[in-house]
């Protein structure tokens, strides 16, 4: 989805903005642009369809030294993918340019109104309406700050805007329901704004998360680099701030070919640190706050991979605590007039904390007076700020569009929550038992990762088949769904996740010698799952089984068998098989030559409906 970066400070602002935009590439985009005030005091704009490299080529040989600039990566919603519709939108003669994330819902009406008053639009976007509105108010004699506020009050929908104004060499930013962060580097007297704190990592040592309808003012004054205002012009304190380590460099892939692979390999370490965070570290207070919320029933809502983690968590909570959990994808839940009651809990799972449908579902529950809890990766995200309590998954920045480590950490955070409900608190014995359990899982995943080459060999044998069915029963069913999602999103091949016993109710008609069944087999319901494999084998399907190690029966019925040490893992065993799926999908995609970290048509953070 769209990305915003703005910077004001002594070092070359254009370089800073381009670096920030490159970091946001992972979110998905189709054009990029930058606007700045040149050394001869002209407001200039360069924007190009396609990748950031096109923009960089366009800038070559130009005077691109500036103290202030704003940039944008666009993921088209209104208007085609072309240079004109790319951001920033600008009126250089008036010394103003702007970038926008989100959707202006009343853009049609505003465009008609302003056009009838003689304003000329240069693009087909809804975004440009905001620029034209600001110019309209400047023409009326309003100060730039008031012109922005008046324009903001007129628009409807969820948006974030960043405006560069030449006359005062200032940047303004404001949002409603869309992500926006500001940052300061106190040592270098620099100030930043972005749609994603990741763009500012290592650059800003203090990060600010403004609330909705707070005007952020970035100014070149050394004393007041950043100010916040309410819409009535008064100073605002409605923001959250946190210190950030300047040494932190999440942008590096290290020795890995892809971020996805790096993130798969990070899992054991992240798992090990989770119990420490929740039992001995900062996380404990948040877990206690979560335990205080009512939970007669739990409504779990999320999208994509986070939704599949929700199925895993539902199983944990229902099995251990007999608390009924209802699960629904956020895009359906938000429009379904769900039955909710105030003694229930609404749980939202999200890596980004900015997924539009998940946020809308959370808002709906809040409006009903139902307490809301998040299991979320991004501290300070909209979901994090809006929920009554939050359980951080501590996965670190996830760059690969295909979610891997976030899924594991989401499931495990839900597991800890469920276990603490069951045990009724944080005794040493609970802490030790859970730490040992997660440490064992981490060790088993380490062992699997060391066998990457074996998984690559299986991938080599099957990558040219044209259809994949991931199957599993019980706790392995959500792993099948997640496995199929991973494969289709990064390898662009058709894959479906099915409950193993359900295949014969229809999809088995598709099975022939060109279809692969990736069978996820646990020790529970083992014989029944094997029977389901036999049904596919009898119809010439190619069998890849991932299941208990040294299992003769499974090995014999499979074309390819990958044995995993599952003993002692109990309910966490399916998470081990999920890592095998992650590596299998990764290697199939690599053999097929797809863009693994930034698959076509996808965005990391889906901030529009
Ligand atoms: O940021 P979120 O966890 O809310 O994102 C939800 C989905 O968009 C996300 O999990 C998506 O399905 C991933 N691309 C899956 O790998």
Image (spheres, rainbow, N blue to C red):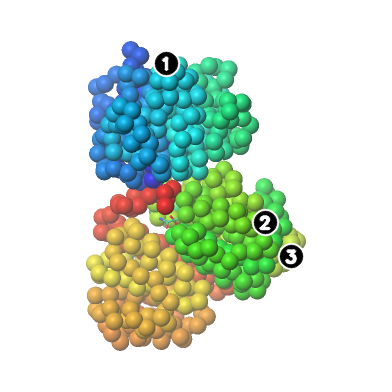
- When asked about the image quadrant of residue 25, the answer is top left
Q: What element carries label 1?
A: loop
Location of mark 3 (residue): 424
The residue at the point 29 percent across, 29 percent down is: 120
Location of mark 2 (residue): 290
Would you call the spot at circle 3 few (<14 residues within 10 Å), some (14-19), or many (20 or more)? few
Separation of marks 2 and 1 at Cα, in angstroms: 49 Å
Q: Which of marks 1 and 3 is nearer the N terminus?
A: 1
Location of mark 1 (residue): 167
The residue at the point 33 percent across, 12 percent down is: 40
Frontmost residue, 608 versus 154: 154
Specify the quarter for ligand 1: bottom left
Q: Is mark 2 on a helix, strand or loop?
A: helix
Residue 211 appears in the picture as rendered = yes
Q: Where is residue 86 in the image (x, y as percent from the top left)?
A: 30, 36
The residue at the point 52 percent across, 51 percent down is: 359
Which quarter of the rendered picture does the N terminus lie within?
A: top left
- When asked about the image quadrant of residue 366, the answer is bottom right
Q: Where is residue 65 in the image (x, y as percent from the top left)?
A: 35, 19
Q: Is mark 3 on a helix, strand or loop?
A: loop
> Along the horizontal axis of the image, is 491 left or right of 338?
left
> Along the horizontal axis of the image, is 304 left or right of 540?
right
């Amino acid at each position: 989805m769209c990305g915003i970066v703005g910077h004001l400070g002594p070092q070359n602002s254009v370089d800073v903005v381009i670096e920030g935009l490159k970091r946001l590439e992972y979110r998905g985009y189709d054009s990029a642009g930058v606007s700045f005030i040149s050394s001869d005091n002209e407001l200039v704009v360069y924007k190009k369809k396609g990748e950031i490299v096109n923009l960089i080529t366009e800038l070559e040989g130009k005077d691109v030294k500036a103290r202030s600039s704003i940039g944008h990566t666009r993921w088209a919603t209104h208007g085609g993918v072309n240079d004109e519709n790319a951001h920033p939108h600008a009126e250089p003669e008036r010394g103003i340019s702007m970038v926008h994330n989100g959707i202006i819902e009343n853009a049609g009406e505003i465009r008609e109104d302003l056009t009838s008053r003689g304003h000329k639009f240069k693009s087909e976007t809804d975004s440009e309406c905001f620029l034209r509105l600001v110019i309209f108010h400047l023409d009326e004699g309003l100060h730039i700050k008031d012109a922005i506020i008046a324009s903001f009050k007129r628009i409807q929908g969820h948006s974030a805007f960043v405006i560069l104004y030449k006359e005062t060499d200032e940047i303004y930013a404001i949002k409603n329901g869309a992500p926006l962060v500001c940052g300061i580097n106190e040592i270098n007297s620099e100030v930043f704004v972005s749609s994603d704190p990741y763009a500012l990592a290592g650059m800003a040592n203090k990060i600010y998360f403004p609330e909705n309808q707070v005007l952020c003012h970035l100014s070149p004054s050394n004393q007041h680099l950043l100010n916040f205002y309410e819409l009535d012009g008064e100073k605002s304190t409605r923001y959250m701030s946190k210190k950030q380590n300047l040494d932190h460099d999440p942008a590096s892939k290290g020795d890995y070919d892809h971020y996805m692979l790096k993130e798969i390999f990070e899992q054991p370490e992240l798992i090990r640190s989770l119990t420490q965070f929740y039992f001995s570290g900062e996380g404990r207070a948040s877990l206690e706050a979560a335990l205080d919320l009512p939970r007669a029933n739990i409504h779990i809502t999320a999208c994509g991979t986070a939704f599949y983690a929700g199925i895993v968590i539902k199983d944990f909570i229902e099995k251990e605590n007999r608390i009924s959990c209802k699960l629904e994808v956020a895009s359906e839940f938000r429009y379904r007039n769900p039955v909710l009651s105030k003694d229930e809990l609404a749980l939202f799972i999200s890596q980004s904390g900015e997924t539009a449908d998940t946020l809308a579902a959370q808002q709906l529950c809040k409006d009903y007076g139902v307490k809301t809890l998040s299991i979320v990766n991004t501290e300070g995200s909209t979901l994090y700020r809006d929920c009554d309590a939050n359980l951080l998954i501590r996965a670190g920045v996830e760059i690969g569009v295909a979610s891997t480590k976030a899924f594991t950490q989401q499931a495990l955070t839900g597991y800890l929550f469920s276990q603490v409900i069951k045990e009724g608190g944080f005794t040493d014995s609970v802490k030790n038992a859970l730490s040992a359990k997660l440490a064992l899982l981490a060790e088993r995943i380490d062992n699997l990762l060391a066998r990457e080459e074996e998984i690559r060999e299986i991938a080599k044998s099957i990558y040219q088949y044209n259809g994949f069915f991931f199957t599993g029963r019980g706790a392995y069913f959500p792993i099948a769904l997640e496995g199929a999602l991973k494969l289709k999103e990064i390898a662009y091949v058709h894959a479906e996740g099915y409950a193993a016993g359900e295949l014969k109710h229809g999809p088995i008609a598709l099975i022939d010698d060109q279809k692969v069944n990736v069978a996820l087999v646990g020790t529970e319901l083992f014989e029944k799952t094997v029977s389901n494999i036999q049904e596919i084998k009898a119809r010439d399907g190619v069998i890849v089984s991932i299941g208990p190690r040294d299992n003769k029966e499974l090995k014999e019925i499979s074309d390819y068998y990958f044995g995993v040490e599952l003993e002692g893992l109990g309910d966490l065993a399916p998470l081990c098989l999920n890592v095998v799926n992650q590596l299998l999908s990764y290697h199939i995609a690599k053999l097929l030559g797809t863009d693994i970290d930034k698959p076509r048509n996808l965005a990391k953070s889906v901030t529009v409906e």
